[in-house]
Image: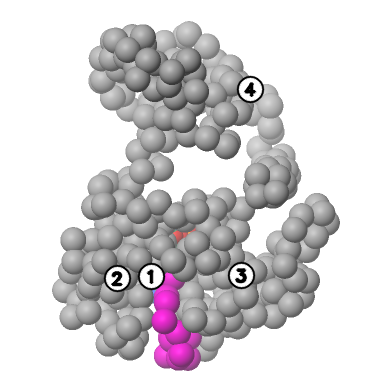
Amino acid sequence: MTRIALIGAGVVGSSWSFVFARAGFEVALYDADLASAERVPAFVRTAAASFETLGLVLPESAETIAARVKPAKSIEDALAGVDYVQESVPERLPIKIELYRTLDSLAAPQVVLASSTSGLPASAFTESMATRERCLVVHPINPPHLIPLVEIVPSPWTKLDVVERAQGLMLRIGQSPIQLRREINGFVVNRLQSALLGEAFRLVEDGIVDAEEVDRAIADGLGLRWSFMGPFQTIDLNAKTGIAEYCRNLGPMYHALAKEQADPRPWSDELVATIEDTLRKRTSAADIPAKQRWRDDFLAKLVDFKRR
Ligand SMILES: NC(=O)c1ccc[n+]([C@@H]2O[C@H](COP(=O)([O-])OP(=O)(O)OC[C@H]3O[C@@H](n4cnc5c(N)ncnc54)[C@H](O)[C@@H]3O)[C@@H](O)[C@H]2O)c1
């Protein structure tokens, strides 16, 4: 496979273009708005050039990588000669249902249809398709050209072979896939994030610490290890003989804490305003775009450091 199709050229589709082109694939890019697709080669050139400026490893020049991304005038043109489609159209069920109905008849039967959806299970928009067994979710963490993790989520009717092909392709393009055994709301990453955010909001609401201190608890504490190993490996290495000893010692404490955390609370407007006040002292609203560029450069260097 040397050519893939991307459908939807917004935030995520643009970043996917860089990922696939960097890995040597010809990228046929279709968007309902042609102008959006036509902007993507320049996005890829700029993103790749900023890697070069930061001194990060790229297999080829920014120009060569960007030249592989080709906007397509029609969905039929985009699908010609591909075995894999990564769909990144808006997170709205009617749009996905309509698009998958079109792909059902237009895409050759061997073509894998993968959705970038953040939270819709593939079963919600593929159920009535004749060829639904070739559909699944391949959920990136935005932006995928900086963050390698992807969540591969089969629907109840996705064929195993399709899951394996998606997994193999993600490895080949340098991403880091995890495979969910079945559909679940929020997949894995957002479920983990939800548990942490729920507690972060609670700690501020109860006046224990402010938002800046919660952020530091992660950035200067837990997050340092989490950027190269997960919570299980962390606790495995925090007891002389590993995880079983850790759980014997601290399992009851965590169980008691989990009971205190069991009542989910809505994030009230007042609480959000308090947290926003703290955050705006660190970064004014006008400085957010510059801070986002700082974050992306930092991420790129961190990922490059880990790869080395
Ligand atoms: N933005 C994120 O942080 C993020 C992260 C992970 C996954 N996702 C998922 O990726 C998908 C895309 O999100 P996004 O943020 O890139 O959205 P976006 O709004 O930036 O881009 C969507 C693009 O799809 C195009 N489009 C709309 N209808 C279309 C159609 N029928 N055919 C072809 N193109 C069409 C639009 O013109 C637009 O360019 C969503 O399912 C979203 O949940 C987003």
The reply to whether the residue tagged 3 has its Cβ within 8 angstroms of ligand 1 is no
Q: Which mark is residue 220?
A: 4
Residue type marked 4: Asp
Mark 4 / mark 2, whichever is N-terminal? 2
Helix, strand or loop at mark 2: helix
Circles 1 and 2: CB distance less than 8 Å? yes
Mark 4 / mark 3, whichever is N-terminal? 3
Q: How far is the residue under mark 4 from the one under mark 1?
A: 39 Å
In the image, residue 292 above or below residue 221: below
Is disc 2 surrounded by few (<14), some (14 to 19) or many (20+) residues within 10 Å?
few
In the image, residue 161 above or below residue 30: above
- Check disc 3 and report the residue beneath it: 23
The reply to whether the residue tagged 1 has its Cβ within 8 angstroms of ligand 1 is no
Mark 2 / mark 3, whichever is N-terminal? 3
Give x and y (percent) for residue 177: 44, 55
Which residue is depicted at the point 46% across and 30% down? 233
Write down the region rendered in magenta: 74-87
Foreground of the two, 239 or 185: 239
Residue 134: image quadrant is bottom left
Foreground of the two, 280 or 225: 225
Is 294 left or right of 92, judged from the image as shown? right
Q: Is residue 81 magenta?
A: yes
